Image (tube, grey):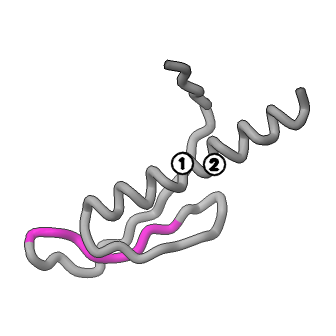
Amino acid sequence: MERNVTNKKETFIVKVEYSQNRSWQGRVIWAEEGRQARFRSALELLKLMDEAMNSQQESCLDLENSVS
């Protein structure tokens, strides 16, 4: 199983606006990209952050492949 690892770090700003039903609701801001998204649970927050990291990693891989 091949796994590509990048050392690029990302910054997320998490704004928890409510805490209902034992979970968080609010906004997450991806600082480097200036994008934001709303989340309805802590799990959804983690999924959003993971998707952002994966999309960043894929775009880095696309750049690497186009240079080769």
Q: CA distance from mark 1 to mark 2?
A: 5 Å
Instruction: Determine which quarter of the picture holds residue 41.
Output: bottom left
Q: Point out which mark residue 26 bears.
A: none
**Closest to the observer, 56 or 32:** 56
**x, y percentage for residue 12?**
48, 58
Q: Is residue 12 magenta?
A: no
Query: Does the residue at mark 1 contact the one at mark 2 (Cβ under 8 Å)?
Result: yes
Magenta residues span 22-29
Please identify the residue farthest to the right as the structure is shown.
67
Three-letter residue code for mark 2: Gln
Q: Point out which mark residue 56 bears.
A: 2
Q: Is residue 26 magenta?
A: yes
Check disc 1: other Cα within 10 Å, few if <14, some if 14-19, many if 20+.
Answer: some
31 relative to 51 in the view: left or right? right
Q: Residue at x 39, y 65 (%)?
A: 14
Q: Which residue is mark 1?
A: 53
